[in-house]
Amino acid sequence: QCTNPPPDSAQFAFAKEYTGECAWECVADSYLFNGTCEACPARSTSPAGSVGRTACACAAGSAGADPDSCAECAAGKFKAAPGSDACQTCAAGSFATTLGATACVDCEAGSYHDGEASEAACTPCPAHSDAAQGSWDATHCICNAGYTAAAGGQACAACDAGVFKAEAGAQSCVSCAPGSYQTASGASTCVECPAGTYHNGAPDTAACETCPALSSSAPGSTDCVCDAAFSGPADMACVECLADLYDDQDRSGGCGAGVSGDDCNSALYGNCAASSRKRLELLVPELAYAGVPLEVVVRKRDFYDQVVLSDSTSSLQARLVLGAEEAQDAVSATFEGGISSVMQHGEAVFMLSVKPTFESWDQSSGQTVLYRTPYVVFAGLDSQTGVAMQSPVTMLNLSSGALPVCPRGYMLDLDQPTELGVPASCTLCRQGTYSLDPLAGTVPPTPSCLACPAGGSCFGGADVQFAVGEWVQSGGVWELKACPRGYSVLPGKNESFNQALQECRMCGTGSECDADSCIECSPCKPGRFKSSVGVDTCEECPANTFTEVTGASSLQACQACMKGSTTLGLSGRSSWSDCECDVDRYLVAVDQVCMVCPVGAKCADSAGTCALARPDVGCAVGAGEIIGTWERRPSGEFELLACPSGYELVKEVDGEFTHNVQQCRACSTELQYILNPNEHQCQTCPRGLTCHGNHVTEPEVANSTWVADGEYMRLLDCPSGYLVVNSSLDQQYCKRCEALTYSRNPTDGCSDTFPPCGERKCQTCPNGAECIGGDHFRPLASGSVWELLPDTGSGSQTFRVRSCPAGYILVRSESPLSDTCVLCPAGRYSAVPAQFPDTLAVPLAQNALDRCNPCELGMNCSLGGSNISNLPDYWFVLPRRREVTSSPVIKTYRCEPGACLPGGECSEGRTGILCGLCAAGWARAGASCKSCGTAAPKVYQYAALGLIIPITMVAWYFISWRAFLAPEEESGSRGLEMANPMRCKGVQWLVAKVAQLFLDHDVLSYAKVFISFFQIASTFDTTFQIEWPEALRTIWRLGAFLRLQVMDLPGASCIAADWSYLAVLQAYTITPTLVALMLWVPVCLMLASRKTGGKKFKKVSDRFYFAFMFWAFLIYPNLAIMTLKGLRCTEVAGQDLLAVDLRAPCPSNSPGSVEFLWPLITTLMFPVGIPLVVYYALRSSGIPGLAKKKVRDATLKQMILKHRELSVHMVETKIASRLNLLATAAPESAKDPTRVVFERVRDDRGQVSCQMLLNYFQNSGVFHENRDVFESMFQHYCAADSATISFEQLEALFSDIKAKGRVMDEFVTCATISNTDLDRLVHFRWTDMLDAEENHETMVTKALRKQVEKAKRASVQGLLDGTAEHRKKQRRASLILQHRDSQEDAEAIPSSASRSEKLASLLEIGDEMIERSAISLPMLSWDADSADPHERQAVDQFGFLFKSNRVQVWYFEILELLRKFLLTGVLVFVYPDTPEQIACGFVVTAFFFILYGKMNPFRQHGVNQMQNISMLTQAVTLFYGLMDGMSRLREGQSGGTDNNAMVFLLCFLHGLVFVLPLDGMFPFLREKFVKTIEAARNSLFPPNENESEAELDGKDSLHPADESGRGIDGHRESIADLVVGEGVFEREGLAFVASLRPTSSAFPPASGIDSPPQGGSAEQAIHPEDVAPSFAPPLETLHISNLKYEPPDEVRVGVQGGEASQAESGGLMC
């Protein structure tokens, strides 16, 4: 019964009773405020007994920042409990569709929700799928039974017929089990096959199949069984069983049920063979327990190991035996229960319970030992046959040893309580007990079941259940480890353990356990109590009460707080200090009293909180702060001791201290100041100060000086640029100077007394300065110097200019206002400062610019003044300090391309003068510096260079010592069989093939041109100061290796990085000399041993000459440029330095020094000496004379051929000419013609048949007409009765024919020609023939030309090889046809002349004929196998120099050395580092390009072509460099823009130099490529066969229409070059002889020249007899297509010295 009623029964509710006096609290959803309960705002709530509005919080389903902003949760969100938390999105798998939800509802089965707030409802699963309740993802939708999908959430498809899915899930459909089927789709089960059908589980079969004939099946069968007496494999026809399965006496007896084959083994009874032998099979469990029944199956099987299903009457009995002996054993084990059974369908089942005898057991280890392992055997009488049956003896594997002896829940029941030799069995524990260990027990060592714990329920065996607590198995018993909240574990931790007494007991009064896992209960803490027994925790003391007692058991233990204090609504307080004073009071702890807060100690919050109650004696954040210094007295009260600046101290009323009125009163801010807050009054703030209502004042002008004077602040001084104004206290301030004026003395015009200062003006700003007001005076020219001088006119200080920085001209006159510094304009500069009155000072500004210097080449003066910098690739030095005139004082120098950067910087890795030196760690490689990396890699660099030594030794051996060490006979061999390494014939064959390839294609010539090109081109980067494209530099760096620029290699350049140029030059000049000496050593040894007469010495010396010349060829360009660079100097900043090494002075300044003499001497030795040595070698070996002799002999030969052509008359002469032509066409034409013919016709025995020889002559075209003349001559030497002809007879036949035909032999030379033949040639009328060439052009010539034009249109392919010059000669030679019948002219040379005079006159005529193109010389070459020993020796020794060249230009290598000397050496001194230098190089290259183009120095056309391309590439490269250099000169910098098209052209031309050697050496690659292109062209643009003659007549010429568009040697030939006449022409080893001659001097006039003669045909065949064969007969028909006239006489073509190319149809066919 409450003694105190509630204040308002509607708002207050009963809380608790405290001894008759009740505590009342506000109901839920309200709070206590000022003694009344106020309702919480809408959608907010509070618990009952809440105090203050802050107790209200947004209710469940609503959220907001404060109670006034609570709003309902949106759809899809919820809020489960009241509080300030925000609404949460429903978890995946749940949803909320209404506003203000307090919980989300799980998605129904068959739907899901992925947690997206935008989706308020759940999404249904796809058809035929389902999901569990609360699913949150589409993958949770799994297909129903009978349907499947690749993954969850995807569309489910029905299982096909023949497959099914029994359960819902993600698994796939599976085939029906064998013996079942399903024909419908979407099935969840399969149907059992009916009887008479079967299904073997085949995946492609949906329905069951009917059994075959003579077979049957039970329902659900996987196959069919043949009927009785039939057998057969599955799925096949059943066949009848064999006879031996039946009774021999009566087949129709009971044996009729038997079957044969693999399945003929199920006889039922009788004396059949199949049933006469039976056996028993046992199926015994793998493990059994003592006394626990085990199932043993006994099956009866027949001879074929099949169960005899017909036996259901035979009886069997089990007995225990010792083992294999089958002796009875009643000691080790006994049976319990039945031991007999009757068979059912051939099978008997026994439930045996065996009690064994245990020898020992151990409870601690849990191990048991059987006395003996029991064995069992089954026996009985076969009721079908009366025969006794017995099974094999089988062991019963009873559990023992380390295995549990009994199953879980059993205990080992001993017949007697002993440890040894006692029978025992496993017994199941009864209800109320349990067993975890069969050997454990309450009375050790006898095993027994354990009593059930007090806190559990035991249902027998091992089945134990516990209501509460954490139980674990420990040592075979259940042990209680912990209890839930509010419980304690019994027995306690201080009591002895008893497993039967274990339970969880609730805590008593005054104690609790609030942990999740409890062991024991603890007493209630201070501030809490518990008055009853139970699982509840201790209760808190109510609000405004406290208790300090531990273990309180009633509410009376809670005491009320002291007066004027509360616990702020908190319960469970444990001390009086938890009772806090009201907010407007503070605690006096000594008296435990809450004092009223003074006025100055209250905070600025709405409750007026007392700051003195806080430990820090201050207000909370945001509640303001209290002013002044407060101190607590010993009595516990606070006193205000002092106030801060700007405040007055108030703590007395009527002169007495009053506790409650203490405060600090503030002065007015900004308008007042106070110097001493406890003594002075607030003062008005002056104009020049900024006041803050306290003692702090700030001057309006920084650095102005103010001082305190009593209670006032006074202005004494102002900073520079201001005037002091202090005429009154209120108007004190600093007046600032205006713009365009300045002041450096703020007290100008003021007296020393105070207050003295009024208003005045500042100084005017001069022209050369900037004045923006105040004391700001900034010279417009940065770095100019101005001095402050007294102004006599005003008495103030004035600035005057004293000096101007570099780049300016000083202007100063009488007036200070005109002082200024004038900046030099763009394009001009001044490098030194201007000083008054000495340097660059003028009185007028208009004269200033004349003193500036103009900008020089390589300088950037675009900004004017002193802003000068070098352009890229330029370098300059600033001048010494001296008087500057209008002339330039700075000189610029060109740097190497890319070396100098703008601003005077060097590119990476460069340093020094002109940035021409490589920095430390860098080394020069060509025209650039390359990084050498760290010191460690130098070891590898030395190692790499060290490889040169063994390579050099190996090369030295093969070049010099191999022939020296070889035996004499091997050294003299000219074949490929050398020393022992070449003995292998396979290697010999390979080397021979490679050597033949090199010889056939003249690889050495290509290599010389290739190397020469890169030897010269690789010097461009260092010779010319051009920034070449990086692609070219990369190619040239590779080519530098070909001129042995070893120091440019990465390793060598780093090793020699610190060497001087002299050291490098010495290395480059000494090394070649040493190599030459090394090559000479074997020759020297043989000379010393005087072994100079044999072939070995010749071979050794020949190799030396070849190696020496090749070595000189390799080293010459590099030595030329290196030695001459050592003499070129340059001037840099007044110093003469070596241009190639700017560290060294100019050598020419010290003529006697090594630096000068070494390059001078080596220049004479190498660049000058090597060409002289080459010339001497050629002269000494007689090369000029040999060349002259070969030219004379060739001229004589051509005159003989021309004489033969123009003097043939009689039949014998025609035959002789054709025989000669036949011989000369052979590759072995150097042999005797008779020998050539004889060797071709002879058989394997070396004999020549007369008939064979006659057929050969006939097929070869030796005679065409006048066959009888030839046969008469032939039969004279080869009689009809003779089968063979001898060589002597054939030689006599040839001599007879030549004698009768007066045919001269063209194989004679100037030395061997007979006097008779010489006279015939000398007296021949050559003059008339030449005059006829000058004066006549007959109708025949015009007609022939017309026919040639028509032959063009017929696309007759090229007959002849030759250049344009050759074609010109052949056109002129066509006129000779008019004089074929001319007589010999005997008037030219008198008969009395000597042989030499005749020969000289004849050769002069020949030279004139060659000049007039009446005859032409063939391609002359050098022969290493020549009959002339001088030629052989010259070719063997110095053939490297001239063998690949035409004989007429034997001196070509000397010209090449001259070209290399000019381009690599001499050019270094010609206009160095200028475009003129490049122009000179271009002129030299162009000159040699034209010269070589006219000379065609090489025998091989491909080599000449490559030489021309390489020269053109160098010329175009230099032209590009010239244009680039001129562009940079015009722009005054090194930039220049790369022409991408030009760079591509240069790279393409350089690539040609790589490709052309392959094209020349391997022409089949080119032919394959050209044929492919031609085939593609013809497929795209087929030729027009109907092209009219009018169109063709309008064309100048047509080229042969072969696939390559070229003639025989690759030249494009015009059909107009068909030869009228006869001649022999050679090119690249291919000789061509052709003649085209008419029978009369002109066509009949009636026929005209535009119409063909009578009898013309569209296609005229030429007889094979008129054509000399190119190789062995027979020769096929030669024809010309579309020939519009009939050849009057003959057209004859022959090939010499090589194979003729086969032309396509429509042209010339051979």
Image (cartoon, rainbow, N blue to C red):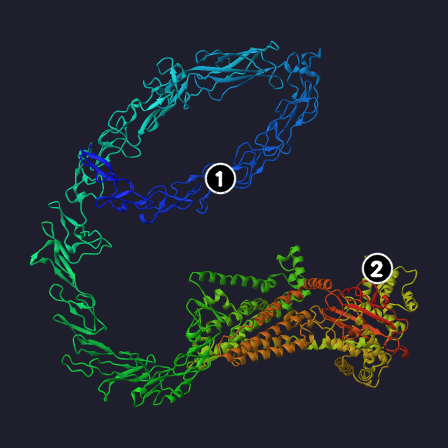
Query: Which residue is the extreme one toward the left?
Result: 655
Using residue 211 as the reference point, say whether residue 1220 is left or right of it: right
The amino acid marked with disc number 1 is Ser
Residue at position x 9%, y 50% in the image = 634
Q: Position of residue 19 (x, y in %)?
A: 17, 33
Q: Position of residue 1154 (x, y in %)?
A: 45, 77
Query: Tag 2's secondary structure?
Result: loop
Q: Which residue is mark 1?
A: 111
Q: Between residue 1630 and residue 1679, name the one nearer to us.
A: 1679
Residue at position x 66%, y 55% in the image = 986
The numbered dot on residue 1247 is 2
Which quadrant would the N terminus be assigned to in this image? Answer: top left
Instruction: Say which quarter of the image contains residue 560.
Output: top left
Question: Who comes first in sequence, dot 2 or dot 1?
Answer: 1
Tag 2–tag 1 contact (CB < 8 Å): no
Say if 357 sits above or below 10 in the image: above
Q: How busy is the neighbourhood of tag 2: few (under 14 within 10 Å), some, or many (20 plus)?
A: some
Q: CA distance from mark 2 to mark 1?
A: 111 Å
Instruction: Say which quarter of the image contains residue 553.
Output: top left
Which quadrant would the C terminus be assigned to in this image? Answer: bottom right
Q: Between residue 910 and residue 309, name the one nearer to us.
A: 309
- Residue 973 appears in the rendering: no
Q: Position of residue 1396 (x, y in %)?
A: 76, 82
Instruction: Say which quarter of the image contains residue 429.
Output: top left
**Marks 2 and 1: which is nearer the front?**
1
Q: Position of residue 1457 (x, y in %)?
A: 59, 75
Q: Between residue 1211 and residue 1690, name the one nearer to us.
A: 1690
Say if 810 sits above or below 646 in the image: below
The amino acid marked with disc number 2 is Gln
